Image (cartoon, helix red, strand yellow):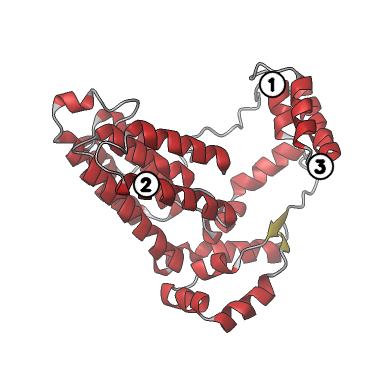
Amino acid sequence: VLLGAAAASGALPFPRAAYEQAIHRAGIAVAGSLRGFAAGFDRASTAPASATDGTAATKDATGAPADAVGLPGDLDRRIEAALPAEARALARAGVRRLIDYQDKAYASFYLDRLEKIAALERALPASAHERVGHESPSAAVARYLALWMSYEDVIRVADLKTRAARFDRVRRETRAAASELVEVEEYMHPRVEEICDTLPAWLGRRVLATGWMRRVLERFTRHGRRVRSSSLPGFLLLHAIGGLRRLRRGTLRYSVEQARIESWLALIAQVLPRDPALASEIAECQRLVKGYGETHARGLARFEAIIAAAVSAPPGVATAQTVRDSRRAALDSI
C-alpha cells in the first residue's frame, strides 16, 4: 500500500508498470501485493497534494513532535554555553524529547553526556574540523543520543497509544464525524524478552536465565492479544503500562540500554581526537538501533557487527567511508 502511494506521488522517476513488474518478479503473495499496491496508488492519486486543515504535526530534528514540551531555562542556558552552534538546535530538540519520554533529570543526563563530546571536539585543532564531513561529532551525537535514550519499549508504546493526540489523529484519518463513535483496536504481542525488559533488572535477568520461568511466561504470551484502547478497560490497561515510566530506571531494559549507550559513547570519545569524521560515522550507526522486538534485535546485531569490526581493525583500515558503507548496507538489509 505504501509503495503504491509512493508511486502515485511521482517522487520517483518510475512508471506504474515498473513497480508492478517488480512485485511480479519478487513472487511473494503477488495477487495480494498487487491489490494493496493498486489501493495505495488509487488513494494517493485522488488525495489532496497537502494537508489544508492545519492539523499536521511538525517534527523536530530527532523525529519527535515539535514543541511537545517546553524547554527549561536552565537546560537551555547549558546548551548555549557548552555546545557548538551546529549542535544547539538538535540538543534542544533532544531535551524536549527526553522530558516527554521520561523527565527533566533524564534530559539533564543527556546534556551531561553530550557536553563531554563537545569538550573533546572543542579541543581539536582548526584543521581537524575541515575533515569532519557532513556533520560534526557533537551534532551527530546530539541527534542520535537523544534517539537512543528514548528507545522504544512496551512502556513507551503504551504511553503513545493512550495520548489524546493519537485519538485525534485516528479520527482525522478515518474522517469520522463529530457524532460518530470510533473504535480503536490494538494488536499486542510482546515476546518474553519485552515483558522481562519491563521487570526490575534483577527479576528480569532471573526469569530469562531460568528455563521453567520462561516456559510459564511463554505459555501466556504465545498468542497475541487484541486490546480495544477506545474502551475504558483497554484504555486503563494501556494507561497503567504507560505510567510505569516512573519506574523505568529500575527496569532490565534501562540497565541494558544505558550500558550499550555508554560503550558507544566511549568509543566515539576514543576515536574523536584522532579522526573526527570516523567518530561522526560511528555516532550515526545508532540509526540501526530502532524499534523493539525482532526489529530491534536485527538492527542491534548489525550495529554490534559494524562496531566490532571498527574496533578490531588495524589503524587506518576502519575509515569513515568504510563505516558509512557498512552502515548503509546494513540499513538496506533490515
- For the residue carrying disc 1, how many other residues have a C-alpha within 10 Å: few (<14), some (14-19), or many (20+)? some
- Sequence-earlier tag: 3 or 1: 1
Query: How many dots with numbers?
Result: 3
- Sequence-earlier tag: 1 or 2: 1
Q: Nearer the viewer, residue 239 or 181?
A: 239
Question: Height in image: 334 above or below 37?
Answer: below
Residue 90 makes an appearance in the image: yes
SS assignment at label 3: loop
Residue underneath mark 2:
309
Residue underneath mark 1:
9
Q: In the picture provided, is 132 more to the left or to the right than 201?
A: left
Which kind of residue does numbered mark 3 sit on? Ala
Q: Nearer the viewer, residue 202 or 132?
A: 132
Residue 329, image x, y percentages: 50, 37
The Cα atoms of the two marked residues, 3 and 1, are separated by 24 Å
Question: For the C terminus, which image quadrant?
Answer: top right
User: Which quadrant would residue 273 be assigned to in this image?
Assistant: top left
SS assignment at label 1: helix
Residue 70 makes an appearance in the image: no
Residue that appears at 45% across and 63% down: 253
Question: Height in image: 6 above or below 202?
Answer: above
Residue 211, image x, y percentages: 56, 81
Residue 308, image x, y percentages: 36, 50
Q: In the picture provided, is 171 more to the left or to the right than 198?
A: right
Which kind of residue does numbered mark 1 sit on? Ser
Residue underneath mark 3:
29
- For the residue carrying disc 3, how many other residues have a C-alpha within 10 Å: few (<14), some (14-19), or many (20+)? few
Which kind of residue does numbered mark 2 sit on? Ala
Residue that appears at 31% across and 49% down: 312
Residue that appears at 77% across and 32% down: 25
User: Which quadrant would residue 77 be assigned to in this image?
Assistant: top left
